[in-house]
Every structure is written in C-alpha cells, then in structure tokens.
Amino acid sequence: MSLPLFIARRLATTEADSQKVSRPAIRIATAGVAIGLAVMIVTVAVVMGFKHTVERKVTGFGSHIQVLNVLTAGSAQALPVSMSDSLVAALRNHDNVRHVQRFTLTQGLLKTDSDFLGVQLKGVGPDFDPTFLAGCLVEGRMPQFSDSTNAQHLVVSRTIADKLRLHAGQRVFAYFIDDEGGVRTRRFNVDAIYQTHIRRYDDAVCLTDIYTATRLNGWQADQCTGAELQTDRFDRLAETDLPIAISLRAYRDGYGQQLTTRNIRETFPQVFSWLELLDINVWIILVLMVCVAGFTMISGLLIIILERTQMIGLLKALGARNSTVRHTFIWFAVFIIGRGLLWGYVIGVGLVLLQQQTGIVRLDPETYYVAEAPVELNLPVTLLLALATLAVSVAVLIAPSFLVSHIRPARSMRYE
C-alpha cells in the first residue's frame, strides 16, 4: 500500500474532535455529492421513462411506419390501395421490420338514444397486434377482428364512452354517408373500452373489423387504406423507412396506384420535438449537479488542508514531497466522494423504485399523456453517472491540492 493511500485511510477512519472545523465541512461535501448523484439518477430515470412511455403510446396505436396511397399521404382523405400478400411479405422481409398489418379508415357517426358523436373507425383484421391496446383497456376484452365477415366488433375510447354513456357489452348504432349521399346504418357491440391519454386517438378513434370498414367505403375486398409496420428498434426508424420508400417508388398495385411511406415522426412532429427538448433539460441538470458536487468538494478540501497545516508541515519535515502530500489529500477526498456516492446511489435508486412500485407522483394526463410519472431504472446508466461524478469531482480537486506546495514546514509547525 502506498504512503498517501495509507495516511488517507487513517484520516478517513479516524474520528475527529467535535470542535474541529473539518467535520462539518466533510459532512457538507458528502451531502453535496450524495444529493447531486441522487438528483441525477432520478432525473435520468424520469426522462428515460417518460420518453419511452410516450413513444410506446404514440407508436403502439399509430405504428412506426405506414404504407399508404401516395395521394393519401398529402391529403386528409383516405384513398384505397391493394395490399397483396406478396407485398406484405416483401415489407416484412425488410431489415428491422417486426410486424406488418393492414388497416382501413372510414368516418361515421355513433348514436345513442340521448346523444351522437362523429368518430373515425379504424378497421383491422386477424393480423392486428393487440399487445399495446390490450394494456390500455379499462373495460371489456379485446375481440378477434375479422377480414371476411361483419362480426359487429367495436372498441371505443374512454372519452367516447363517457360522452355517449357507453359501457362494454352495450350495443350502439352507427351511421355512414356514402359517396352518393346515401346513409348506411350498422349496429355494433361495444366489446372493450381503452384509454391511451393521447387525445388524437381518445377523442375520435374506434376499432372495428377491416371487412366492415372496407365495405362501408365501397372498396373492393382486396383494398384497404394501407399497412402499418412495427420495427424492432425505434432508434433506427429513419434508416428503416428510407429503403422501404425507395423500393415502393417503382411499384404499382393491382389498380395502378402508387404507394409511399409516412413514419410516426412525420405524423407527430410536435410530440417528438418536445421529447427531444427533454434531453437538453437533462444535460443542464447533470451539469448543474456535477458543479454543485465539485464546488462543495473544493470548499471541503481547502478547509481540510488549512486545518491540517501542522500535519502537512510535519510530513514535509520528515522528507515527504509535495506530490506525496497532494496525493494524500486527493485520496482523502476520494474516500469522502465515495461515501457520498454510496449514499446518493442508495437514495436515488430508492426513490426510483418507490415511484415504480407506488406511482406516488401523479401527473395531469391531458398535458403529459400519462397519469403518473413514469420512471425507468437503467443500472448501467446509473453506474456510469456515479463513475462520471467521481471522475469529475476528483479532477476539479487537482488544482486546489497544489495549495500544499505553498506550506513551509518551519511556519506550519507553529501554525495554530
């Protein structure tokens, strides 16, 4: 064991006198490091949890990439395309594509005895992936959608159900206007009620059978609005979307329609721009907390050096070099920082686990899309934060440690 490390360990483990100035300074420095790390862990956990939760909600209902009629992508009207089995298989074979499902959009009017409401019906078939929506159900059970018969299935949002006073198991009539001005009537069974807290979906979107939606639009059986693609990695969205769009440029469906793609970032640009701004807030908080930890450690080290002036003089009188004395106090600071990091890690991770288990911090879902503050505990990231805090805190102590070189043994031995 080196001499600086040995002396630093003795200083760190020796109980100082209660009247010593360094004891409160050490406690303040330890608390500063602990609070800084705890705040950084909680901040990163909240931002990561919030970003991933909102991304899952937006993409879970709207998919990562949509393949549409090129005229649909530039207008509000849904125009049909023919999504053959061979085209679906080709889309599924693209790199990073996990799932492909057809869908059809149509507009209608839900009516009860006391009220009515305009909605958008999204028709889906047996290839529909219910994983996300099943986790958002607040009432009822997810039905098995059909592409060959009108099974009268209907899944509505909590918002629509409250406006029309609907519950799972009830029946509701829907009215649709065709291109010739005629009115079609359909009766649906409300199988389930969902809630995503995404107003764009909750205010208007209902799910039904793709067969029903296609027939209501007056389209052929092999036509639909398009296909939805789910990817394995959302961070590779752009590099997945581009090859698919390029491959569709020369493609024409059975009716001569050209296809194109639209990804979820283009559909919800404001949401993803907002999420990207959160990264800036995280970096600001991390820098501030590291600065707090660094400044408290600098103050504590200077106080310790001034208090230990006689010890420094004695070490120099015994032949210790300035570098040896500097390393002694840097090692001493490392022990203080390590103690603070340990407490900060326990507090930070504990607060994150508390929120995960209890959801004690609530949010306004109308503003934040979630009812409680989502947190995501990533142990490698938390350890990296602790190591980075240790490295920065030690680095900023190098310059103040040179103060020991100005202490002269003759004067320091008489220092009171």
Image (spheres, grey):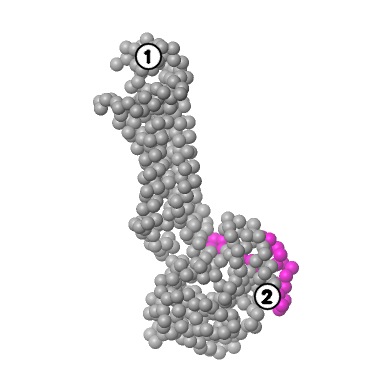
Residue placed at 43% from the left, 45% from the top? 40
Tag 1: amino acid: Leu
Among numbered discs 1 and 2, the one appearing first in the sequence: 2
Question: Which element carries disc 2, helix, strand or loop?
Answer: loop
- The answer to whether one can see residue 201 in this image is yes
Q: Nearer the viewer, residue 230 or 252?
A: 230
Give neighbour class at mark 1: few <14, some 14-19, many 20+ (Cα, 10 Å).
Answer: some
Q: Which mark is residue 84?
A: 2
Give neighbour class at mark 2: few <14, some 14-19, many 20+ (Cα, 10 Å).
Answer: some
In the rendered view, tell whether residue 184 sits above or below residue 294. Answer: below
Residue placed at 59% from the left, 83% from the top? 148
Which residues make up the magenta segment? 242-270
Q: Which residue is mark 1?
A: 314
Q: Position of residue 387 (x, y in %)?
A: 47, 38
Tag 2: amino acid: Ser
Residue placed at 65% from the left, 66% from the top? 92
